[in-house]
Structures are given as C-alpha cells and as structure tokens.
Amino acid sequence: MTAPLDISPASCTQRPILRERGQREVFCGLTGIVWLHRKMQDAFFLIVGSRTCAHLMQSAAGVMIFAEPRFATAIIEERDLAGMADANEELDKTVKRLLARRPDIKLLFLVGSCPSEVIKLDLSRAAARLSKAYAPKVRILNYSGSGIETTFTQGEDACLASMVPELPAEASPEPSLLVVGALADVVEDQFKRLFEQLGIDRVRFFPSGSADDLPAVGPNTRFLLAQPFLGDTARLLEGRGAKRLPALFPLGVEGTAGFFKAAADAWNIDADKFDSVIEMPRARAEKALERYRDALAGKSIFFFPDSQLEVPLARFLSREIGMTLTEVGTPYLHMEHLDRELTLMPDGVRLSEGQDVDKQLDRCRAERPDISVCGLGLANPLEAEGLTTKWAIELVFTPIQGFEQAGDLAELFARPMNRRMRLAV
Ligand code: SF4
C-alpha cells in the first residue's frame, strides 16, 4: 500500500498536481555539455570537478579519438578538497595551459560541479579574474552543472543564462525574433526557411554557432522558447527588455504549427499566408505520423521526471498519436511557459512535479504502462520487470523539433515497442 498522495491544485490550469520531494533519479547538468559543445563550435567547457564528473562526461559523450575535444575536466584532487592546495591557483594554471595549446577557443565556460560547490570554489570570481587576463581574445564565463539541485537539461539553461549579459544591445528599431534553445543544425535550417517564407527576416538563434556572432537583444526583441527548460534564460532575456511570445513547443504537427503561429501573429501575418506557408510541411508531417498510429494508438505511457520535455511530449503523444497518458512526471512545472501545453492535456492524466522515486515506481508497477519514459538508471530495472522503456535522454540528443522531424519523434516511441514485441515472439 502506498502513502496517500499529496495533491494540490495548480492555480493556472485548475488541474491537480502531485508534488513530491524525495529521492530523485536524474543526471546532473553537466550532461548538457554533450549537445552544447556540438552547437557552439568555438567554445570550450572546462568542468571543475572530480573523476566521477570526468567519467560521466566520457560515458555520456563517448571518447572522441579523432577530433580535439571541446570539453575537459580539471580534476579536483583529494588534497584540494582538504584545502591543502590553492584551487584557484591550480585552475589558473590549467586555463593558461589550455588556452596556449588551443588558440581556437573563443569562449571558455568554467563549469561548476558538486565537488567545486562543496569546497565553495567561487567560479564566478575565477571567471572574472581570468576574463581580465585573456580579454578580448577569449571570453570566460561560468555556470553550474552540479547535480545537487539540478536535472540534466538545466545545464543548458544555466549555460545560456550565463551568456545573456554578454549579448550585445539591439541597435535597430526594427523588431527581431530570437529562437531560444539549442536546436540541431538541420532543425535550425528548416525553421529559418519557414520564417523567411512567412516574411519574418530578422531571425536569430540562441545559442549561435560562434562566440563572435552573438545575437543582439533589446526591447524590440521578441523571443520564442524552443525548449521548455529555459526558465532562467527567459527571465534574464526579459530583464534585457525582450518579450516572450507565448507558444506551444515545436513538437509534433500541432506544436510546430502553434510555435510558428505565435510568431506569425506577432508580425501580423495574415492567416491565409500562414496556412499556405505551412500547408506542405504540415501535410508531410501528418503523413509521416500515420504509420505510427497503428502501433501506438491506445497504448499507455508513463513519464518519469527527467528531461523537462515531458509535458509537450505527452501532449503530442495523446493528441496526435492517440496514446493514453497515465502519469506525466516532470522535474519542474514552469506554469507560465507550459500554460498552453497544459490546457491541451487530456482530462484524467496525473501530473506530477518533482520525484520520490520509490513511490513513483510503485505507481508505475501498479499501472504497468505499455511504455515508460525514464532515465538510464531506472530503465534496466524496469525492463527486467517486463516493462518497456524509453530513455529520456535520447529525446534531447535527437533532432525532434519541427514538421520534418515529427515522424522521427513518433518513431522514437514505436521502436522500443517493436523491440519488446520481437523479444516476446
Ligand atoms: S557534477 Fe555531481 S552529480 Fe554530476 S557527475 Fe559530478 S559529482 Fe556527479
């Protein structure tokens, strides 16, 4: 018998929300480096951490043998933890060696970890000190990827938030659009084309590929969040005068159409033009989804809190694929940013925020969903119990946004179901 559920109403959606604070099973924010270092071609991520942090990064990113890596770990040794060495001095030496060897680095992130936070190493002061020494050739920023209070996608939020004060002020009085959140290049190119066809030409993406080409921001900037986990970044952009366009997240046909519609409305683009621009890609996406409905419609799905993509994914899977949502768990429910998503959530779904992993596992076992979306740490035990799982982290590593990727997104959920069926034969 599980303990009674702590359910409180959510003011803006009027939905009950189960809020849990207990043991969590999530990766830390360092993981974001895996996709961010691919996006920012002249940036380097120097983790100030332990051997555990280095191992996590190596296993998450794979060992890069052929290329010069764009991340590394400055290991805090036991003597540093015991306060026997001046960690700042060691860090300065490491940065000096790194920048001498790698003149291609334009932007260096000092990334905090649990050990650097435990010894209270002030990386913001270190970044300011080192910036003075290496400016203007290298910009040095810092953020925390520590697992003490984060879930893994918060690493991207912290990284982008650290860059917001560095963005130049927008000089033009013309409105501009900023798409915020790291997207695969293929998705970015498709989005650029669609904005162009709509007649929105001053469009920038953040993060950009180069530290020398940061997008400008100011009161005439309107921004669209491409990812639902960028609360701090959004707040800081608003602090620079930019205005967020409330929108769905660009997952699936409906989400992508809603995402572009928010921009089209802000630029007063008439409905006929909007429909004609998205007609073809929308039709292609709808066709791509058809083949997955047979396999997935009516199947039940349970989301453990992990990537913070859970709410828009659940909206897509229930409304466009016909899956049945049991529990949709997410590490944090950002009510303002998820407002439109939550209004489209079907009745009866259990929304949960935070985690008490044992209680949640009990609920999952009792429901025995057809598929559970969870972190790597839970996937193997659940598979061993005969439950089919999908690794949440794959959803962040794979290009899934936009019309052209809608089929690939559905495929990510169909694949584990097919594998399970084949194993059962
Ligand atoms: S930052 Fe913390 S949780 Fe992440 S790998 Fe290092 S020690 Fe582990």
Image: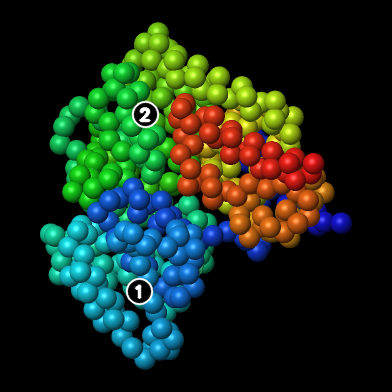
Three-letter amino acid code of the residue under disc 2: Gln
Residue visible at 36% across and 29% down in the picture: 191
Q: 9 or 403: which is nearer to us?
A: 403
Query: Which residue in the rendered view is the most extreme toward the top?
Result: 272
Three-letter amino acid code of the residue under disc 1: Ala
Mark 1 and mark 2: span between their CA atoms?
Answer: 38 Å
Q: Residue 369: x percent and y percent? A: 76, 42
Q: For the C terminus, which image quadrant?
A: top right
Whether residue 27 is visible here, answered yes or no, is: yes
Choose top left, top right, bottom left or bottom right for residue 418: top right
Query: Which residue is the site of mark 1?
Result: 74
Q: Is mark 2 within 8 Å of ligand 1?
A: no
The total of numbered circles placed on residues is 2
Q: Residue 114: x percent and y percent? A: 47, 71
Query: Which residue is the site of mark 2?
Result: 190
Image-based side of 115 in relation to 126, left or right:
right
